[in-house]
Image (spheres, rainbow, N blue to C red):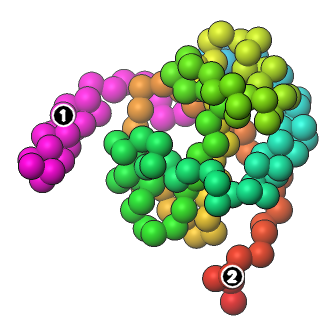
Amino acid sequence: MTFLYDQAASALRSVYDSRLVGPPVLDLESHFPDAGKFTGSWQEIRDEALAIARDLPSVPRFHEIMREQESISANDRRDWRMFVLKAYGTEIPANMARCPTLAALVSAMPEVLSASFSFLAPGKHIPAHRGRRGIVRPRMPTRRAACPRDP
């Protein structure tokens, strides 16, 4: 039964993907003019993410939250963990409380439907994929943490 479901889901996904139009990268100013409020607070947001990262084993893997994402989350046996503050318009109060700076920004902008931190294991590969909504993924300075797999 699982095989049949997976085949049907794959067929539907290809129909969905064929109907997507638009560029792969959206113009930030025209699609999300308030992005500067997030990038202007990047240091505080980074500090909140680092605090969450200190307890990374308690953060669920992306495909544990959304089974439909297994093909891009569990594809290479390297973790992709997601700390979700808001998903599809629904806030997660306990997670919002842990990140007051990001939560305040998200709460002040009803057009922001989802907000989360992604934590990728070193060497994690996310296969190419598509979606209908625009996603702002600011590139912030990062420090590479030591990993037991590092030589």
Res. 145 image quadrant? bottom right
Residue type (three-letter) at the residue carrying disc 1:
Leu
* Residue hosting label 1: 12
Q: Circle 1: is it few (<14), some (14-19), or many (20+) Cα within 10 Å?
A: few
> Measuring 27% from the left and 25% from the top, which residue is drawn there?
19
| First of labels 2, 1 by sequence position | 1
> Measuring 85% from the left and 28% from the top, which residue is drawn there?
101
Residue sitting farthest toward the bottom: 151
* Residue hosting label 2: 148
Magenta stretch, residue numbers:
1-27
| In front of the other: 100 or 18 | 100
Percent x, y for residue 150? 68, 83
- Judged by depth in the image, the label closer to the viewer, 2 or 1, is 2
Percent x, y for residue 10? 20, 43
Q: Does the magenta stretch include residue 115?
A: no
Task: State the mark number for residue 92.
Answer: none
Q: Is mark 2 on a helix, strand or loop?
A: loop
Considering only vertical position in the picture, is 151 above or below 72? Answer: below
